[in-house]
Amino acid sequence: MTDQSKAGESLLTGLGGSALHAYRVAGALLLTLVSAWKSSRAPGEGAREVCRALTVRQIFYTSFQALSMISIVALFVGATLTAQSEILGGPLQRETTGRVLVTVVVRELAPLITAIIVAGRSGTAIATEIGVMRVNSEILALASLGIDPPRFIVWPRVVSTTVSVPLLTIYFSTMAVLGGFIALFFIDSHAVAEWRSGAVLGLSVIDLPLVLVKTVGLGAIVGWVCSYYGFEVGSSPTEVPQKASRAVVQSLIACIIYNAVITMVFYGLLVGGRLQ
Amino acid sequence: MNPPEAPAPYDLVRVELTDSQRPSKKRKEREPGLTLDRVDFDYHGHVILSGMDFELHRGDSAVITGQNGCGKSTLLYVAAGLIPPKRGAVLHAGHPLGALFPSARVQRGLRVGFVFQEGGLLANLDVLSNVSLALRYHYDVLDLDEGALSARAEAALETAQVSRNDWHRQPAHLSFGIRKRLALARALAIQPNFFFFDDPDVGLDPRTAQVTHQILCTLRDDPEVTLLVATNRPQLIERLEVPGFSLHGGHLASHSGKSSLPPSTRPQR
């Protein structure tokens, strides 16, 4: 066999292996979500109450405890965007500056940056916590007690990120606009009225379904992917940081792709680029 | 479940206890308890259980012995329905566990108590919450109100002799012996009808080991509880006086005779 054919064979083997791995991961990811959803519908009033309390607590951890971080990031992002628009547009383009800020922040930046923050903060925590539970046999212990791990562990976390990302996105958008307003106030306090009218024009009713679909999807991706990688941990503690890191990277990639696809589908196909 | 076939090339593994083997048991009818039907299990090709048939009737008890790493813990996990076998079926009281969520098992009256060799305690819950979690999760199935739930959790902790001073501490702040007793209390609280205990007295001081042995003897004598214990401790095996099985190469071999102690571990007198 020549070197060329050997290289070709090894390339094919590598591609086949990658495809099989991707297929296996996709199947396991789907199984994680389906079993969590199915178990959440299982009967049991006590189970429902315990899991509801857990979900509320998870929402508190994911959303309320992230407010300070979201505030800082959003204020500075809004201020930076306004300063850049001011540099580019100058005093004659103040209305456009306000419009650009609101459009860019609400449609694109707020959902994506919020999802990135939730993935970095809560996604790491989810994957690490579940991984440590796997290592300590806590998942097996739950099953032995008649507690469904997908319902008790996965579902509350997926629901919490799915609820938290839309809420935090609204908060992020508000704080970013506030940051832009403050920045402009320091640049030229007389320009605020013009800038504000532009900001109001930047908002459109058609943005609402887009933002909702985006944020719910992004939140679900973070909780789902990070839970899956937490369950991927075997019996060794050294796997926990490895899987946690992979969980965050994979969920971020998935979020960025999902965000782009939804934007293109929504504005390219559904709205047909009519929105100005 | 597949019908029994010709005798396997290995020793008898289907337990048919006689009254003389365990006189304290009162149950007369032979109702199904724990059944392993041609169970295979391996870790990445390393065979742990191979075509295993095993049956304990309701209320019966047995001890599993074997060298370290032979798969005693895995056998207990599979028998308790915590991990699915690669092939074959595991049944509790005649119900195949494969398709059932853990909560569905409890709803069918299949309550499992499992004490792990190590770990298994929920690290973010204190002692009392560890014990009461399953009771709270199944309060409607077990028909418990808040008072009965607390009383049962407290009774389990007292049976396992976990001091009240420790009830609001987290497992990480407890000694190994107390953690082991806490795990035992948690398993007892649900009033299991299938009890699995992995290395009950390893690392315990004599007093704690004595408490554990006493509780195991009580479970052994309970006609509602099917008990499976993995241990190599001669004192415990002697005290339990139940049929013993040695796990080797993925197969179980029975130790015949009144004592369940395998010859290699019989204490010198």
Image (cartoon, coloured by chain):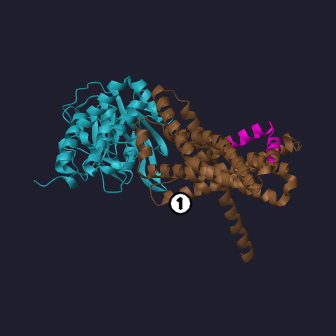
Chain colours: A brown, B cyan
In depth, the one of A264 and A227 nearer the eye is A264
Q: Label 1: how many residues lie within 10 Å, few (<14), some (14-19) or many (20+)?
A: some
**What is the secondary structure assignment of the residue under circle 1?**
helix
Which residues make up the magenta segment?
A195-215
Residue that appears at 39% across and 40% down: B80
Residue A128, x across and y down, in percent: 50, 53
Is residue A202 one of those drawn in magenta?
Answer: yes
Residue A251 shows in this picture: no
In depth, the one of B122 and A69 nearer the eye is A69
B193 on left or right of A83: left
In depth, the one of A109 and A220 nearer the eye is A109
Which residue, as the protein is rendered here, is positioned at the far front? Answer: A190
Give above or below for A134 relative to B108: below
Residue that appears at 20% across and 36% down: B21
A135 on left or right of A69: left
Q: Amino acid at mark 1?
A: Gln
In depth, the one of A30 and A260 nearer the eye is A260
Give above or below for B258 relative to A86: above
Q: Main secondary structure of the magenta part?
A: helix
Task: Provide the residue designation for mark 1.
Answer: A242
Chain label for disc 1? A
The quarter of the picture where residue A84 lies is bottom right
Residue A53, x across and y down, in percent: 49, 34
Residue A266, x across and y down, in percent: 81, 42
B249 on left or right of A119: left
The number of numbered badges drawn on the structure is 1
